[in-house]
């Protein structure tokens, strides 16, 4: 059945470990839609750790489907050097149950951020054509009017190894979809049970 509201989960991130001469590392953000929904969702804002800010290394941003239906994506809104990434969604489609993996490169930091955590905001139909309204300030009161819900995930040290999922090669472009191997689904379920943060909003 279609749910009147948004039930979603942002699972624990994984990343490629920084080695001695690496200039960047890749972060994968798994976003799961838990139930089919019937509310408009126009964008997902991924806000990076701060002070010093993590920075997007390039626009080599990829997405792939793990299971179910993936998010229907429009062009990403980001530039190299940005400290956040706006994932734009197809406004004509509603969300359906499934797990989407979003992967992007981060420039090698000189030190870990003081505020080493990530924020992910789901934004609705009050978001402007250029992302206006889908914003996050430091106080809760500075959230843009398009923000429906916000998730926070703890940061990590990219010099340390991630889970075995870091070895997964995701090569699908933002306009394509593919199946990821079955063991990823098993790992995703385990991570959701052990570490996932589930947010729920009723409309």
Image: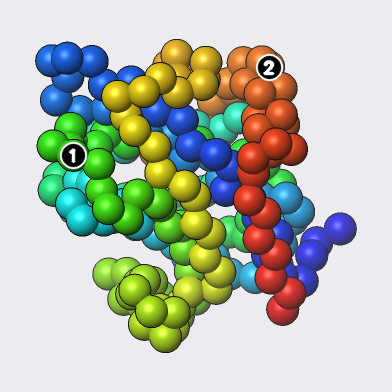
For the residue pair 25 and 113, the one nearer the viewer reads as 113
Q: Is residue 199 visible?
A: yes
The image shows residue 66 at horizontal and vertical percentages of 60, 30
Q: Secondary structure at mark 2?
A: helix
Expressed as whole percent of the image width and height from the top left, the position of residue 135 reads 35, 72
Q: Which mark is residue 111?
A: 1
Spot occupied by residue 87 in the image (x, y as percentages of width and height): 39, 53
Can residue 129 be seen here? Answer: no
Q: Position of residue 190 (x, y in %)?
A: 71, 29
Q: Residue at x 40, y 28 (%)?
A: 15
Question: Is 182 above or below relative to 64?
Answer: above
Q: Secondary structure at mark 1?
A: loop
Q: Nearer the viewer, residue 90 or 87?
A: 87
Locate the N terminus and report the quarter of the image it occupies. Answer: bottom right
Residue identifier under label 2: 182
23 relative position to 67: left or right: left
Which of pointers 1 and 2 lies earlier in the amino acid sequence? 1
- Report the number of numbered marks: 2
């Amino acid at each position: 059945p279609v749910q009147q509201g948004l039930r979603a989960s942002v699972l624990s991130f994984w990343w490629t470990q920084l080695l001695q001469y690496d200039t960047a590392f890749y972060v994968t953000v798994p976003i799961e839609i838990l139930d089919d929904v019937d509310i408009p969702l126009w964008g997902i804002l991924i806000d990076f750790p701060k002070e010093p800010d993590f920075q997007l290394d390039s626009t080599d941003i990829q997405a792939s489907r793990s299971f179910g239906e993936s998010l229907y994506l429009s062009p990403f809104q980001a530039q190299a050097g940005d400290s956040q990434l706006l994932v734009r969604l197809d406004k004509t489609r509603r969300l359906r149950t499934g797990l989407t993996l979003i992967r992007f490169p981060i420039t090698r930091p000189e030190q870990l951020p003081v505020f080493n955590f990530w924020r992910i905001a789901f934004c609705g139909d009050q978001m402007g054509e250029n992302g206006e309204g889908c914003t996050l300030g430091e106080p809760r009161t500075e959230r843009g009017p398009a923000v429906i819900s916000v998730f926070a995930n703890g940061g990590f040290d990219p010099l340390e190894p991630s889970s075995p999922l870091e070895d997964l090669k995701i090569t699908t472009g933002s306009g394509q979809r593919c199946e990821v191997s079955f063991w990823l689904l098993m790992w995703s379920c385990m991570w959701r049970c052990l570490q996932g943060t589930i947010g729920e909003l009723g409309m």
